[in-house]
């Protein structure tokens, strides 16, 4: 089923275009990496604050509302550029275990970030739950590191 | 020229041979390199956007300088170490690669831009530390830095598509 879909997708005009125009994939990858740079850096600031390691001059609540919007703003561009790369090389991505691991980690980290963000409507929520905040911060930072590593390993499968 | 000789010595070291012959060393070092680069670019972007008066406008420039740039430097050190290891594995080919040379040139320009900012506009930061609109030299430094870092990522990615 999925292999057939990959096959079909890689023969569509748009996929053929991406495959044959030399600069499209590196250019789109560059934008993709720049998006990841923005997301991981803002998430690192937030996660380290959740874990209580940096930026203590600001409350957790302020840190969440300062950093999370950058993630939601960048994520669509990241997904769009990611989709272009998938359309260009469907089999290389969709049939790749590193790609699948990357997507699983992405889903978890988005869920954690959404949870942290939604609960932050009550400004005192995370102040009162320091150990949960710490756990969320550490796990999400590790997941981002895993996402970047898995992303690079896709090329070596 | 001494550079080609250094390159051929470097790629014949045991370390370089180990990176070349291993199936997992190169991708692992590369992952560390990419992770470090994303942290450098993302964190420097925060500072540059403050210099441009676009983000963190309610925070003083010196606060951000103290809070962010040590992370940038630490990540940059990791990127340089990991990048040097990757370079050593196939030094001559990297040295001969056009995008690699452009990347190094761009990094040199970034160093120049940073030095001009730190030794110039930033010396008088106390006069505009909390201003939302920073002086022109500071805005220029921020804007130039963003453009050059985007080029570094672009050339870096381009290496993988052009290296023989």
Image (spheres, coloured by chain):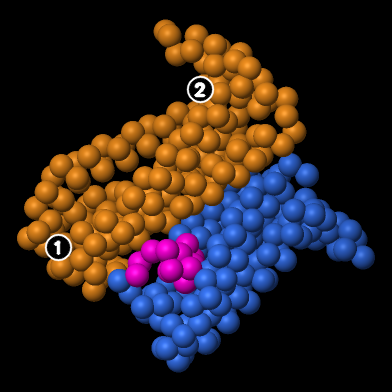
Chain colours: A blue, B orange
Up-down: is B130 above or below A111?
above
* Depth order, front residue of A92/A40: A40
Q: Would residue A49 be counted in the magenta stretch?
A: yes
Q: Are marks 2 and 1 on the same chain?
A: yes
Q: Position of residue B95 (x, y in %)?
A: 51, 22
Whether residue A151 is visible: no
The answer to whether residue A93 is left or right of residue A119 is right
Dot 2 corresponds to which residue?
B95
The answer to whether residue A1 is left or right of residue B60 is right
Residue furthest bottom in the image: A122
The answer to whether residue B43 is left or right of residue A29 is left
> Mark on residue A55?
none
Tell me where the magenta segment starts and ends, as one range: A42-56
Mark sitting earlier along the chain (2/1): 2
Q: Residue at point 42% right, 49% down?
A: B40
Q: Residue at point 73% right, 29% down?
A: B22
Q: Position of residue A26 (x, y in %)?
A: 58, 46
Q: Residue at point 64% right, 56% down?
A: A146
Magenta segment's dominant SS is: helix
Q: Would residue A145 be counted in the magenta stretch?
A: no
**For the residues bearing labels 2 and 1, Cβ distance under 8 angstroms:** no
> Mark on residue B129?
1
Q: Position of residue A29 (x, y in %)?
A: 58, 51
Q: Quadrant of the C terminus of chain B?
A: top right
Up-down: is B35 above or below B6?
below
Whether residue B127 is visible: yes
Would you call the spot at circle 1 few (<14 residues within 10 Å), some (14-19), or many (20 or more)?
Answer: some
Q: Of circles 2 and 1, which is in front?
A: 1
Chain identifier of the residue bearing label 1 in the image: B
* Depth order, front residue of B79/B106: B79
Q: Quadrant of the N terminus of chain B?
A: top left
Q: Position of residue A151 (x, y in %)?
A: 66, 52
């Amino acid at each position: 089923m999925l292999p057939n879909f990959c096959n079909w997708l890689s023969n569509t005009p748009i996929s053929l275009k991406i495959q044959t125009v030399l600069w499209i994939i590196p250019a789109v990858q560059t934008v993709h990496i720049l998006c990841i740079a923005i997301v991981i850096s803002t998430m690192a600031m937030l996660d380290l604050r959740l874990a209580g390691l940096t930026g203590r001059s600001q409350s957790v609540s302020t840190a969440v509302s300062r950093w999370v919007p950058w993630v939601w703003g960048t994520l669509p561009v990241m997904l769009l550029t990611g989709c272009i790369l998938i359309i260009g090389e469907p089999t290389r991505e969709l049939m790749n275990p590193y790609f699948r691991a990357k997507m699983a980690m992405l889903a978890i980290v988005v869920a954690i970030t959404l949870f942290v963000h939604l609960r932050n409507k009550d400004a005192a929520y995370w102040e009162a739950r320091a150990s949960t905040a710490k756990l969320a911060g550490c796990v999400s930072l590790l997941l981002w590191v895993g996402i970047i590593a898995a992303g690079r390993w896709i090329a070596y499968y | 020229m001494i550079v080609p000789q250094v390159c051929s010595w470097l790629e014949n070291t045991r370390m370089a041979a180990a990176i070349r012959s291993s199936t997992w060393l190169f991708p692992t070092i590369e992952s560390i390199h990419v992770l470090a680069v994303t942290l450098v670019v993302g964190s420097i972007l925060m500072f540059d956007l403050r210099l441009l008066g676009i983000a963190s406008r309610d925070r003083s420039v010196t606060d951000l300088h103290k809070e962010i740039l040590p992370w940038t430097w630490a990540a940059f050190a990791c990127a340089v170490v990991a990048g040097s290891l990757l370079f050593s594995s196939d030094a001559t080919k990297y040295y001969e690669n056009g995008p690699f040379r452009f990347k190094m040139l761009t990094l040199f320009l970034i160093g120049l831009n940073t030095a001009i900012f730190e030794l110039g506009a930033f010396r008088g930061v106390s006069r505009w530390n909390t201003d939302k609109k920073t002086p022109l030299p500071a805005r220029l430094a921020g804007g130039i830095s963003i453009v050059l870092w985007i080029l570094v990522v672009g050339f870096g990615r381009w290496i993988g598509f052009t290296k023989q």
